[in-house]
Image (cartoon, helix red, strand yellow):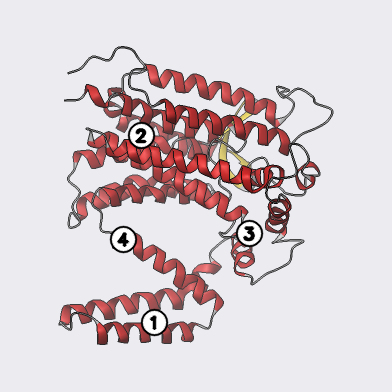
Amino acid sequence: MREQRSFFANVDWMLIILYLVLVFAGWICIYAAVYDETHHSIFSLDCDYGKQAVFIAVAIVVAFVILLLDAKLFTSFAWVLYILAMLVLLSVFPLGSEISGAKAWIKIGNFSLQPGEIFKWAVALALSKYLSSHSFMPKKMGTLMGASILILLPVGLIILQNDTGTALVYFSLFIAMYREGMDGRLILFPIIAAVLFVLALLMDKWIVIIILSSVAFLWWIFGTSHKWKSIRNTILATLFCAGIVFFAHTAFSFLGNHQQDRINVLLGIKTDIKKEGYNLHQSLIAIGSGGVSGKGFLQGTQTKYNFVPEQNTDFIFCTVGEEHGFIGSFFVIGCFTLLILRIIRNAERQRSDFARIYGYCVASILTFHITVNVGMVLGLLPVIGIPLPFFSYGGSSLLGFTILLFIFIKQDSNRLSLL
């Protein structure tokens, strides 16, 4: 076994630099989004950017502590941390406070913590521990079910807190399971179901059924196999798809009114820019007005006059687009892309199955957050209310992502000490 020269030996400083660049760029954008001429100090605790400075300081201290810890602690206590996370999620029901329609917060003095946002890393640790202890083959349904329960338990608790956006993020962990051998069709089916769901809302269901039947018939005619098993599977798949189409409107009715409105706006079913489509409309104006180089720091009119709701949290990317234009947006997305690619690259070089799986969990969660947040700001995806990692205002978000990332940085730095 090799001995490390120091606590920080073999640390990937590129990941840390990217983290710091994104955190401080986000802080500057938060300052611009809520800028008040009566508060000149960026450290004023009366404003969100002052509070974010405190969150950043705490997050950096936590990151430093994680790097000082023994990497084996996260493997040894993965189950304990998962159980503690579930207990905190359960405590939200008797102790939680409601913010923006979701009872998903616990107030501690003047600050509010969102357990569902903070504890993604605990679920990722437990999933990594479980999968690294079980051979994950496509036909091993027991392993698949066990891993799925680990993910679906916090999902169920968070949905009961009426925080659907945060709950959806946990499904990104199935991408890590795919990397470890899960049948790819289990990821493909939800994508197909989502497409059929949208088509059923936009078109007459019988037209969609006719299209499905035609595709199934052509598949049978030109398919490579005409054996009974292949025909049976085609029929079952067609019936499954038809069932989604028939029950799409019924499932849609179970969504909350605000969720229905967001989907209707995205699909063009509703276009009232003064009500349901207001956020998206103002967001597109802000980003579009930035042009190539942007209007300049603190010069964005949409930002300055608070036209975009939640601009310092879920819609923080609007500030980047308006004040820094295409160049600034490209830079931010480029940093996120480099961060994710670096994590994947480091995950693949791990000697430990646990560290590799955890690395893919980190990459999956970050990719989901970035894709959905930027997609909803650009009008490509429904507005589901999830933060942009390291960028959006909020202590729970920043602390959760910091712990998530730095646990992996610590695992990666320890890889050479393994035989």
| Residue 212, numbered label | 1
Q: Is residue 161 left or right of residue 81?
A: right
Residue under label 2: 83
* Depth order, front residue of 233/366: 366
Q: Counting residues from the N terminus, which is met first, the one under dot 3 or under dot 4?
A: 4
Q: CA distance from mark 2 to mark 4?
A: 27 Å
Badge 2: residue crowd in 10 Å (few <14, some 14–19, many ≥20): some
The image shows residue 225 at horizontal and vertical percentages of: 18, 80
Residue under label 4: 186
Q: Amino acid at mark 4?
A: Leu
Is the residue under label 1 in contact with that under label 2 (CB below 8 Å)? no
The residue at the point 74 percent across, 63 percent down is: 273
Tag nearer the camera, 2 or 4? 4
The image shows residue 292 at horizontal and vertical percentages of: 67, 49
The image shows residue 1 at horizontal and vertical percentages of: 17, 18
SS label for mark 1: helix
Q: CA distance from mark 1 to mark 4?
A: 20 Å
Q: Is residue 9 above or below residue 203?
A: above
Q: CA distance from mark 3 to mark 4?
A: 29 Å
Q: CA distance from mark 2 to mark 3?
A: 33 Å
